């Protein structure tokens, strides 16, 4: 394990989520947070012992909220809730996503407003530290009243029911065993849910929010890498860096645009290629896909900033129902995932924009009518060889798919629970779409890196800007220059895997 994350219900960050989900950082519960959770629990105990109806404590759920539950069946009520809501279908979510969901759920359960005993959060951290991961199907949540199905599949494991995977994070596959056996192996007792605790566990946006956290981390890395690809393409196409002059962007001072232009200037600094054609290039302006990189990728950054603002609140927000405020319980709708669903839809849109402009530069690199003297399809023997002809086709296919996935999920409500839950956000659908778009965009940028590096081969011995030269070396560490036709899939996938791990700029 590397590092340690302490949960207190109020200070979780995206970096913490990544550290636990992917890097096996140890997780602990703050003693002060546990003490606060224990104190707020008293309000739930009083409600359970009282005669007044309190939603989810001594009543049924959703449309069945008017059904009173006798005191001697309140624990059965909570267990039944979890078992009945384990209705997810489809392939299981990847291990890092499940870990991220578990972390977020533990953090929220430490909120004073939840009324859950701290043992629930502590047990989740114990499972994380032991490498025990519930099997969570990816489909079945509409995002309100929270991510009910995914969270129920996680809660089920705490009860000692169902199956889990035991695995180290770097293991390709783990052992699938019963939850009861896994708990026994880790010397942990199954949890017996008390009044409201089942509801506390599954009310909330933690599945969609966990995916948003990981996607945002990766999208920000890809945003930086996309500048490396764009700058390398500009060098290979002998474009001009003039459009990145700070004065232009100070005149339209969008923060993302200014950051993007600054990054392009840094990448292109000290370019021998630029100096070689500064005085004898007849072009007055480059095409938009080169000239307008800051305006387009700057807008992508603004979209990521919006999603990050939503997530920063959601990571430490009270998303339960009802909520405990001192001795009072108030019913509301903080479990509704509309903010997160919208952020995920925005994420899919801006990543599609990033991929779309990258595909246009790939076309410019391989098309002899646009490539400023580079050989057709970046091969020295065009005709006999097809070179990178199909790289652009693959990129076009991925961008087209991204565009179909940009139809927003957050407006696609279908009423549920006998129309009690009559407007829902479809946050998990938005998350699954955004995940696919990110993977596509990573491959499109990988394809541009492949073509941009190949374009530089034909301009040697001239050296590109220092930042571009560094990107070129990273590409060539994984992929050799194209000298004869060969299968290209592995080249793209190796570069895409690099982009998934880190920013290359």
Image (cartoon, rainbow, N blue to C red):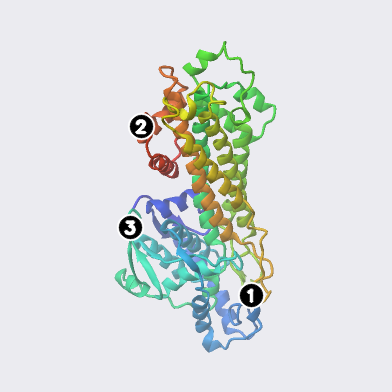
The answer for how far apart the CA atoms under marks 1 and 2 are is 57 Å
Q: Residue 168: which disc?
A: 3
Element at badge 2?
loop
Q: Nearer the viewer, mark 1 or mark 3?
A: 1
Point 57% across, 84% down: residue: 49
From the viewer's perspective, is residue 302 above or below residue 87?
above
Other-residue count near label 3 (Cα within 10 Å), few / some / many at <14 / 14–19 / ≥20: some
Q: Which residue is mark 1?
A: 417
Other-residue count near label 2 (Cα within 10 Å), few / some / many at <14 / 14–19 / ≥20: few
In the shown orientation, is residue 137 left or right of residue 422? left
Q: Report x, y in % for residue 124.
A: 43, 65
Point 35% across, 61% down: residue: 131
- Closer to the N terminus: mark 1 or mark 2? 1
Q: Nearer the viewer, mark 1 or mark 2?
A: 2
Q: Nearer the viewer, mark 2 or mark 3?
A: 2
> Which residue is at the front of the view, 221 or 439?
439
In the shown orientation, is residue 159 left or right of residue 312? left
In the shown orientation, is residue 333 left or right of residue 278? right
Q: Quadrant of residue 161?
A: bottom left
Point 56% across, 60% down: residue: 428
Q: Quadrant of residue 200?
A: bottom right
Q: Which residue is mark 2?
A: 480
- Closer to the N terminus: mark 2 or mark 3? 3
From the viewer's perspective, is residue 362 above or below residue 28?
above
Can I make out residue 310 in this image? Answer: no
């Amino acid at each position: 394990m590397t590092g340690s994350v302490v949960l207190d219900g109020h200070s979780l960050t995206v970096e913490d989520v990544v550290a636990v989900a992917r890097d096996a950082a140890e997780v602990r519960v703050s003693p002060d947070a546990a003490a606060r959770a224990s104190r707020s629990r008293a309000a739930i105990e009083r409600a359970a012992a009282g005669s007044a109806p309190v939603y989810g404590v001594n009543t049924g759920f959703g449309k069945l909220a008017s059904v009173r539950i006798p005191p001697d069946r309140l624990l059965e009520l909570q267990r039944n809730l979890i078992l009945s809501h384990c209705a997810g279908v489809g392939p299981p979510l990847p291990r890092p996503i499940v870990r991220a969901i578990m972390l977020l759920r533990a953090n929220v359960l430490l909120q004073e407003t939840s009324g859950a005993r701290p043992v629930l959060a502590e047990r989740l951290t114990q499972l994380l530290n032991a490498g025990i991961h519930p099997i969570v199907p990816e489909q079945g949540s509409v995002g309100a009243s929270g991510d009910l199905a995914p969270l129920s599949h996680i809660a089920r494991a705490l009860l000692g029911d169902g199956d889990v995977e035991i695995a180290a994070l770097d293991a390709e596959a783990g052992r699938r065993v019963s939850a009861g056996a896994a708990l026994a192996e880790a010397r942990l007792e199954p949890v017996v849910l008390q009044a409201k605790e089942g509801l506390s566990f599954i009310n909330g946006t933690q599945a969609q929010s966990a995916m948003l956290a990981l996607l945002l981390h990766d999208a920000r890395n890809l945003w930086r890498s996309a500048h490396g690809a764009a700058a390398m393409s500009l060098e290979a196409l002998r474009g001009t860096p003039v459009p990145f002059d700070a004065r232009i962007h100070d005149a339209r001072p969008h923060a993302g645009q200014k950051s993007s232009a600054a990054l392009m200037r840094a990448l292109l600094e000290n370019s021998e290629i630029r100096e070689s054609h500064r005085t004898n290039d007849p072009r007055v302006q480059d095409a938009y896909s080169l000239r307008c990189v800051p305006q387009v990728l700057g807008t992508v950054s603004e979209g990521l900033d919006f999603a990050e603002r939503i997530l920063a609140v959601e990571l430490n927000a009270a998303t339960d129902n009802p909520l405990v405020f001192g001795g009072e319980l108030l019913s509301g709708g903080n479990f509704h995932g509309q903010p997160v669903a919208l952020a995920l839809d925005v994420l899919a849109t801006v990543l599609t924009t990033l991929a779309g402009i990258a595909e246009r530069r790939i076309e410019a690199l391989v098309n002899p009518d646009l490539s400023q003297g580079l050989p057709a399809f970046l091969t020295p023997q065009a005709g006999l060889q097809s070179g990178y002809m199909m790289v652009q086709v693959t990129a076009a296919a991925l961008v087209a798919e991204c565009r179909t996935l940009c139809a927003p999920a957050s407006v696609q409500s279908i009423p549920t629970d006998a129309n009690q839950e009559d407007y829902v956000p479809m946050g998990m659908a938005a998350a699954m779409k955004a995940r696919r778009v990110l993977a596509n965009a990573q491959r499109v940028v990988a394809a541009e890196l492949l073509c941009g590096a190949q374009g530089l081969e034909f301009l040697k011995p001239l050296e590109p800007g220092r930042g571009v030269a560094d990107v070129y070396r990273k590409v060539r560490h994984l992929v050799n220059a194209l000298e004869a036709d060969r299968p290209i899939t592995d080249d793209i996938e190796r570069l895409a895997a690099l982009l998934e791990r880190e920013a290359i700029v």
